[in-house]
Amino acid sequence: MSDTDVLRCRDLGKSFQEGGLRVDVLKGIDLAVARGEQLAVVGRSGAGKSTLLHLLGGLEEPSRGEVWVDGQALTGLGARARGRLRNRALGFIYQFHHLLPEFTAVQNVAMPLLIRGSAVGAALAEARTTLTRVGLEHRLDHKPGELSGGERQRVAIARAVVTRPACVLADEPTGNLDRHTAERVFGLFRELNREIGTAVVLVTHDMQLAGQMDRIVTLDDGAISSDAA
């Protein structure tokens, strides 16, 4: 793995058994993401985009191939070691924010730091700073049910970057938002990428948003059909 790569996979494949048939969702993906790079992954529904993201993030086990995250092999790690590596090096954002409804915005954002073992006071202070950076300093103590869709997604972005990860993996992060809110959230996403230097891998159906990234990888039937800057 190159020193400039924060994420890399080789011959990555994922298969499922359905009855007596084997379904190949991903077919030997080779991909490298450089430090600070903004990469969009596009393709029709069922092409394997979300599965690729889950494998790169260690959320699923591949059927074959290897994944490296920030210079460390992810493939083959036990659940605890994999969780530690994810917490240290990766941030995750989804189409649906997956915030914990019983906790406030600042508590949700502090959670990855608390899981890491940070002191409560320090974690909450860093969470407040990060929420202020995404324009939510006036919503720190609001729970997700008291926030708009765009605000909830900004909380999710803050939670993903509060640990200053090497790479953020985002699965349709604006897919559940109207165009105006999506553009605002995406602009914030790219601004934080530039400020923090975190690489971004974005799965999206929105070619307008994808076109603003440094590079676009297209998946077709479980394989990379194009890879262009």
Image (spheres, helix red, strand yellow):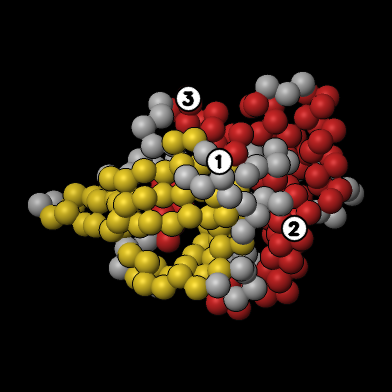
Q: Disc 2 to disc 1, how far (Cα)? A: 18 Å
In contact (CB < 8 Å): disc 1 and disc 3: no
Q: Disc 3 to disc 2, how far (Cα)? A: 31 Å
Instruction: Identify the residue position indicated by label 3 in the image.
Output: 80
- Residue 63 percent location from the top left of the image: 27, 45
Q: Secondary structure at mark 1?
A: loop
Give the amino acid at mark 1.
Asp
Q: Earlier in the sequence, mark 3 or mark 2?
A: 3
Q: Earlier in the sequence, mark 2 or mark 1?
A: 1
Q: Residue at x 55, y 49 (%)?
A: 5
Question: Going by the image, does 68 lie left or right of 210?
Answer: left
- Residue 167 percent location from the top left of the image: 60, 48
Kindly give the residue lying farthest to the right in the view shown: 138
Residue 90 in sight in this render: yes
Q: Residue at x 54, y 33 (%)?
A: 85
Q: Disc 1 to disc 3, how far (Cα)? A: 17 Å
Q: Using the image as rendered, state which of residue 209 and residue 110 is in the foreground.
A: 209
Q: Secondary structure at mark 2?
A: helix
Q: Quadrant of the C terminus?
A: bottom right
Q: Using the image as rendered, state which of residue 112 and residue 228 is in the foreground.
A: 228
- Residue 180 percent location from the top left of the image: 73, 74
Give the amino acid at mark 3.
Arg
Vertical position of residue 151 compared to residue 229: above or below: above
Instruction: Identify the residue position indicated by label 1 in the image.
Output: 70
Give the number of marks: 3
Instruction: Identify the residue position indicated by label 2 in the image.
Output: 194
Residue 169 in sight in this render: no
Give the amino acid at mark 2.
Arg
